[in-house]
Amino acid sequence: MNTNLPIACSLDSPALAQRRSELRSSVLSEAAAVDRLEDCYRWTFQHAADVVARIGAVIDGERQCCRFLRFSMEADPDLGTVTLTISGPSGTAEFLESWLPSHQ
């Protein structure tokens, strides 16, 4: 596993702008809480019937173009909260800020 990947998306500028727009209106916008940590962001979701599948689709899409990202998803027992943490090398949190709705 290569852990020295550059903080870069492989999409060209128009595709990247489209993808960021999609991410801002995706399941990520439905998070009950969004927390910035050192070099990552954590989204916390309340239970919904398809929340895990929709988070999985975001992970799958981003793994294709932003190969430096690390994804961690946890689901609490008894249909509790689902947490998605996206991390990477130093500078990742700043990269992820463009995914937040306030950066439209």
Image (tube, rainbow, N blue to C red):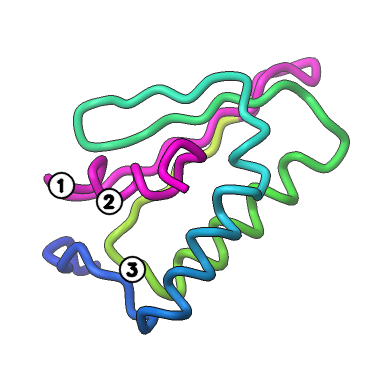
Q: Secondary structure at mark 1?
A: loop
Residues tagged 1 and 2 counted as in contact (Cβ below 8 A): yes
Left or right: where 41 falls relative to 94:
right
Q: Which range is magenta? A: 75-104
Q: Residues within 10 Å of mark 2 (few under 14, many from 20)?
A: some
Point out the residue furthest to the front here.
104
In-image side of 81 versus 70 (left or right): right
Left-right relation of 10 to 88: right
Residue 71, label in figure: none
In this view of the protein, which residue sits in the foreground, 31 or 2? 31
82 within the magenta span: yes
Residue to which mark 3 is pinned: 67
Q: Is residue 14 magenta?
A: no
* SS at mark 3 in the image: loop
Label 1: how many Cα within 10 Å (few below 14, some 14–19, many 20+): few
Q: Amino acid at mark 1?
A: Gly
Q: How far, Cα to Cα, is label 2 from label 3?
A: 13 Å
The residue tagged 1 is 91
Q: Residue at x 47, y 64 (%)?
A: 62
Whole-angstrom CA distance, mark 1 to mark 3, is 14 Å
Residue at point 64%, 48% (across, down) = 25
Q: Is residue 21 above or below residue 83?
A: below
**Sequence-wise, which precedes: disc 2 or disc 3?**
3
Indicate the amino acid at tag 3.
Arg
